[in-house]
Image (cartoon, helix red, strand yellow):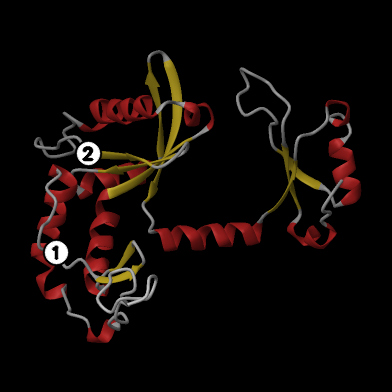
C-alpha cells in the first residue's frame, strides 16, 4: 500500500454512519425518573453517570462529536431549566475575579437561602459555573431555590464593604441564547467608533449623527470609570438607519 493511501480500517479515514433520525431513536421518557436521578447525582454531587447513552458519534480525523438522543437531551434540558439560574453580573461586578464572583454567590446563599425557613433544612450549596465576564451559571440544590431566585429577579450583594448588582435570569440552551441574540440584533443598531484619535473625541457624536442618523444612546466610553481611557465608543442608532451605515468615518 502506497504511503498516504487511505487504509480501510484506519480511524483517520473512517466514515461515521449517518445519525439516526429522532423517530427511530430510543424513547427515554419512560425512564425519566431514573435519568433525572442520575442527573441529580451528577450536578449535585459530582458523580458522573457511566451508563447514559452517549449519542451518535461522528469522527472527522482526530476529532469526534456527538449528537445526543433527542428524548434524552430533552430530559436533561428540562432538569437544567428547573434547577439552573443565569446570574448576570452588571456594571462594576463584571470586573470581579472568578473567585470573588463565586464568593458573591456564596454570600447570597448564606444570607438568603441557607438557614431560611422558606426552604428545606437540608438545602445545601449549589454548583457554580463561570461562563464569562458577565454570566455565571448557578445550579441550585432544589427547584424551589431556583424558582425563588428567578422570581426575585436580582439582588444587591455586599462583599468586603463593596456592593454589587446581579440579575437572576432563567437558564437557556445555546440554541435559545443564539435566537435571543438574533432577535436583539434585529431590534437594535449600534455604531462603534474604533480607536478614536484624541483630537476627534469631541466631534465624534455630531459626526455620527450627520453621517448616519440620530443617536439614541451614547454608551459610557470608559469600561472602568476608575481608570478612564479612550479606545472605542459605542452609540445606539435608530435601526431604520441601517442603510446609512458607513464603512469608514
| Furthest residue toward bottom | 24
Whether residue 205 is situated above or below residue 239 in the rendered picture: above
Left or right: 73 as drawn, with respect to 29: right
Residue found at x 89% / y 39%: 206
Q: Position of residue 185 (x, y in %)?
A: 62, 58
State which quadrant residue 34 falls in. bottom left
* Helix, strand or loop status at disc 1: loop
For marks 2 and 1, the one nearer the N-term is 1
Q: Position of residue 227 (x, y in %)?
A: 63, 18
Whether residue 117 is situated above or below residue 53 in the rendered picture: above
Left or right: 66 as drawn, with respect to 189: left
Residue occupied by mark 1 = 52
Residue found at x 40% / y 42%: 131
Residues under numbered marks 2 and 1 in contact, where contact means CB atoms less than 8 Å apart? no
* Helix, strand or loop status at disc 2: loop
Q: Position of residue 120 (x, y in %)?
A: 12, 39
Residue occupied by mark 2 = 126
Left or right: 197 as drawn, with respect to 114: right
Q: Position of residue 64 (x, y in %)?
A: 31, 64
Crowding near the residue tagged with mark 2, few <14, some 14–19, many ≥20 C-alpha atoms within 10 Å: many
Amino acid at each position: 500500500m502506497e504511503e498516504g493511501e487511505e487504509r480501510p480500517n484506519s480511524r483517520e479515514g473512517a466514515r461515521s454512519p449517518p445519525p439516526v433520525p429522532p423517530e427511530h431513536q430510543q424513547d427515554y421518557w419512560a425512564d425519566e425518573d431514573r435519568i433525572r436521578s442520575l442527573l441529580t447525582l451528577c450536578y449535585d454531587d459530582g458523580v458522573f453517570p457511566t451508563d447514559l447513552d452517549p449519542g451518535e458519534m461522528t469522527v472527522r480525523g482526530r476529532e469526534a462529536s456527538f449528537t445526543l438522543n433527542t428524548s434524552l437531551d430533552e430530559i436533561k434540558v428540562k432538569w437544567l431549566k428547573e434547577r439552573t439560574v443565569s446570574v448576570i453580573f452588571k456594571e462594576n461586578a463584571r470586573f470581579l475575579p472568578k473567585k470573588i464572583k463565586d464568593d458573591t454567590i456564596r454570600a447570597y446563599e448564606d444570607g438568603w437561602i441557607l438557614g431560611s425557613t422558606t426552604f428545606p433544612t437540608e438545602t445545601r450549596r449549589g454548583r457554580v459555573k463561570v461562563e464569562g465576564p458577565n454570566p455565571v451559571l448557578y445550579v441550585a440544590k432544589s427547584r424551589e431555590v431556583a424558582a425563588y431566585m428567578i422570581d426575585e429577579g436580582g439582588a444587591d450583594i455586599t462583599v468586603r464593604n463593596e456592593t454589587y448588582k446581579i440579575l437572576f435570569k432563567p437558564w437557556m440552551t445555546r440554541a435559545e441564547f443564539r435566537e435571543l441574540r438574533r432577535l436583539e440584533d434585529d431590534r437594535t443598531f449600534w455604531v462603534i467608533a474604533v480607536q478614536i484619535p484624541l483630537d476627534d473625541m469631541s466631534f465624534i457624536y455630531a459626526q455620527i449623527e450627520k453621517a448616519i442618523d440620530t443617536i439614541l444612546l451614547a454608551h459610557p466610553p470608559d469600561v472602568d470609570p476608575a481608570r478612564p481611557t479612550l479606545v472605542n465608543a459605542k452609540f445606539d442608532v435608530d435601526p431604520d438607519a441601517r442603510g446609512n451605515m458607513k464603512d469608514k468615518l
